Amino acid sequence: MKYAPNMFLHYVSDIARARTFYESILEMDVILELPEHVAWHIGSGFVFAIQFDPESDLSGKVRRTAELAVAVNLPDAEVDALYTEWIANGAREVESPHNEPWGYTFLVADPDGNQVRFAPANE
């Protein structure tokens, strides 16, 4: 493959609010900060970034186009606790913790409506 994707980007309407949200749920260090862009290294050459766009609010009913997935194996009780923590840090419930064929999962939205899924790492 000549070129491979190496960044996930979410557009946000309030860069400071989004930065606070993602730092609280992902606990990562910023690798690039510009007035309208913040990025974090998420491993294996991948970057997750947020970009200011005043028209980006997806908080209404929007057809899902993508999710940022956080895949880690944890006991169900720890997943439930993590879900509660994310909601307390500003996430909006999309799907509360539940079982799917791939395992115990939940789906939330950031303050702009971008979706973030927590799911088991099926390796």
Image (cartoon, grey):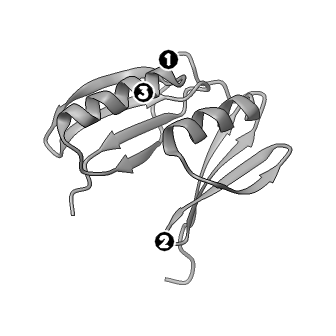
In the foreground, 112 or 42? 42
How far apart are the two marked residues, 3 and 2, measured between alpha carbons?
27 Å
Give the alpha-carbon distance from disc 3 to disc 1, as whole Å. Answer: 24 Å
Q: Secondary structure at mark 3?
A: helix
Q: Residue at x 47, y 42 (%)?
A: 66
Residue under pointer 2: 44
Which residue lies most toward the right here?
Answer: 35
Q: How many marks?
A: 3
Counting residues from the start of the chain, the first of labels 1 and 2 encountered is 2
Identify which amino acid the numbered label 2 is placed on.
Answer: Ser
SS for tag 1?
loop
Q: With respect to residue 71, does 101 lie above or below?
A: above
Locate the C terminus and report the quarter of the image it occupies: bottom left
Mark 3 Cα-neighbour bin, 10 Å: few <14, some 14–19, many ≥20? some
Q: Amino acid at mark 1?
A: Lys
Front of the two marks 3 and 1: 3
Residue that carries the numbered disc 1 in the rendered image: 61
Residue shown at 53% from the left, 25% from the top: 89
Of labels 3 and 2, earlier in sequence is 2
> Type of residue at label 3?
Glu
Which quarter of the figure has residue 20? Answer: top right
Q: Position of residue 18 (x, y in %)?
A: 66, 33
Picture coordinates of residue 117 (x, y %)?
Answer: 38, 39
Query: Crowding near pointer 2: few (<14 within 10 Å), some, many (20+)?
Result: few
The residue carrying mark 3 is 85
